[in-house]
Amino acid sequence: MNNLNYLAAIKKIDGNQITLELKDELNIERLKRVFSDYEGERQAELFIKDPRGFTSEQRAFTFALMNDIYSYTGQPFKSLKDIFYWQFRFLTGKDISLKNNSTNTVDDVSLLADLVLDFIFENHIPFKEGYEVAPQNVEYFFYKCVMTRTCCICGKRGADIDHFDKALGRRKRKSVDHTEFTFAALCRTHHQEKHQIGLSEFKSKYKVIGVKLNQDEIKKLRIGG
């Protein structure tokens, strides 16, 4: 493990104050060398792990994604599993299994599904309409749809990037802070349907969520005009 990364147990939460107990001893000398001559604030990124065993819903979603790759490419399903399991092992240093007796966690299978999603979007693999997206992958799925302009409902390429939860209205694109909005990728047909039936009914029908974007992502998608 990188000795700037530490596993810790959360002992107390009081508003924005969190007390952690490190599993390993803090390498002070390493930190001193890294931050030599640096006078700014020391910051850490907190990632809260989910140690629960993965769900059957996660397994079904991951296999559904792989099956769409198989249907499009003809790559044997077992070979696809081996490829993505190897990628997972390369990134994490541990094995993964989706069998009933597996000890892998919710976080493990969430990462595996994200790897499969990356392959699907990067290689333009058509996906079936109406995925039951596992809750742990929902935000990433809709984010990938936006960044690749893929309709999150039917998978059509070249989708519109819609200001989803709050309309832009009459405001000029160049004068608006687009980081305050959420976005969804919708093909022209589904974009028009959203405006016809209204946001609430559209959300209820398709379970679409809007995702936030940073300035670099907004610039890349040319949302600001």
Image: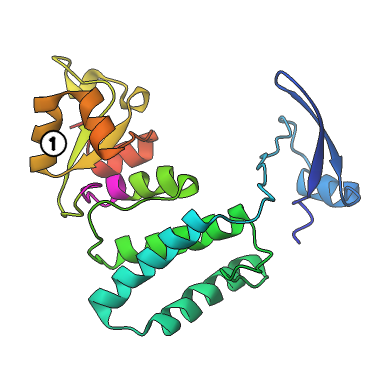
State the extent of the magenta-drawn residues as a range.
145-153
Tell me what residue is drawn at x 27 percent, y 83 percent. 74
- In the rendered view, how is the structure colored? rainbow
Vertical placement of residue 155 versus 193, above or below: below
Vertical placement of residue 8 versus 131, above or below: above
Q: Quadrant of residue 44?
A: top right
Secondary-structure class at tag 1:
helix
15 lies left or right of 192: right
Number of labels in the image equals 1
Vertical placement of residue 108 versus 183, above or below: below
Extreme residue toward the top, this view: 170
**Quick check: is 169 in the magenta stretch?**
no
Tell me what residue is drawn at x 32 percent, y 64 percent. 120
Q: Position of residue 130 (x, y in %)?
A: 26, 51
Work out whether residue 196 or residue 174 is closer to the camera in this orientation and state it.
Answer: 196
Q: Position of residue 121 (x, y in %)?
A: 31, 60
Work out whether residue 194 or residue 218 is closer to the camera in this orientation and state it.
Answer: 194
- Overall secondary structure of the magenta section: loop
Q: Hey, what amino acid is under mark 1?
A: His
Tell me the crowding category of disc 1: few under 14, some 14 to 19, or many 20 or more residues within 10 angstroms, Cα based: some
Tell me what residue is drawn at x 21 percent, y 54 percent. 155
Q: Which residue in the structure is indicated by mark 1?
A: 191
Q: Position of residue 93 (x, y in %)?
A: 67, 70
Q: Position of residue 57 (x, y in %)?
A: 47, 54
Residue 163 seen in render: no
